[in-house]
Image (cartoon, grey):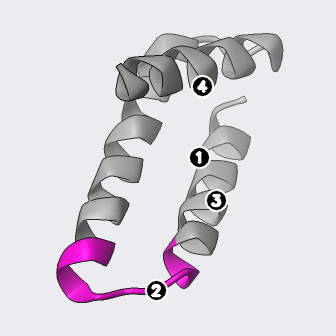
């Protein structure tokens, strides 16, 4: 349920930014988020993961707008 909410949230925000494919990009961002969180858990990474994910999101959104 949380993943669905997050996917819908991302798609809505991307749509408001005028993104051409908000749902597809939201699904890609959710995939990156899941991978980052899994890697952080498995590899014992700390809070820096959040900053890396935010940077990745920003880079992806900037490149696709």
Q: Residues within 10 Å of mark 3 (few under 14, many from 20)?
A: few
- Measured in 3D between alpha carbons, the distance from the residue under mark 1 to the one under mark 2, in whole angstroms, is 23 Å
Residue occupied by mark 2? 46
Q: Which one is in front in this view, the residue at disc 2 or the one at disc 4?
A: 2
Q: If you read the primary sequence from the N terminus, does the residue marked by circle 3 or circle 1 appear first? A: 3
Q: Residue at x 56, y 72 (%)?
A: 52
User: Which type of secondary structure does the marked residue at label 1 adopt?
Assistant: helix
Task: Name the residue that disc number 1 marks.
Answer: 60
Label 4 vs label 1, nearer the camera? 4
User: Taken as a whole, is the magenta stretch helix, strand or loop?
Assistant: helix
Marked residue nearer the N-terminal end (3 or 2): 2
Q: Earlier in the sequence, mark 3 or mark 4?
A: 4
Q: Residues within 10 Å of mark 2 (few under 14, many from 20)?
A: few
Label 1, residues with CA under 10 Å away: few <14, some 14-19, many ≥20: some
In the rendered structure, which segment of residues is drawn in magenta? 40-49
Query: Where is mark 3, residue-wise?
Result: 54
Give the image location of residue 63, x and y in percent.
66, 43
At 39% across and 18% down in the image, what residue appears? 4
Q: Nearer the viewer, mark 1 or mark 2?
A: 2
Q: Residue at x 46, y 86 (%)?
A: 46
User: Can you give x and y, in whole percent of width and height, for residue 11 in the image?
Assistant: 58, 16
Q: Which mark is residue 10?
A: 4
Query: Residue 16: x percent and y percent?
Result: 81, 12
């Amino acid at each position: 349920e949380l993943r669905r909410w997050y996917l819908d949230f991302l798609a809505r925000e991307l749509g408001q930014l005028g993104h051409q494919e908000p749902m597809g990009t939201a699904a890609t961002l959710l995939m990156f988020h899941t991978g980052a969180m899994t890697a952080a858990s498995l590899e014992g990474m700390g809070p820096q993961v959040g900053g890396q994910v935010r940077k990745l999101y920003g880079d992806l959104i900037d490149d696709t707008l």
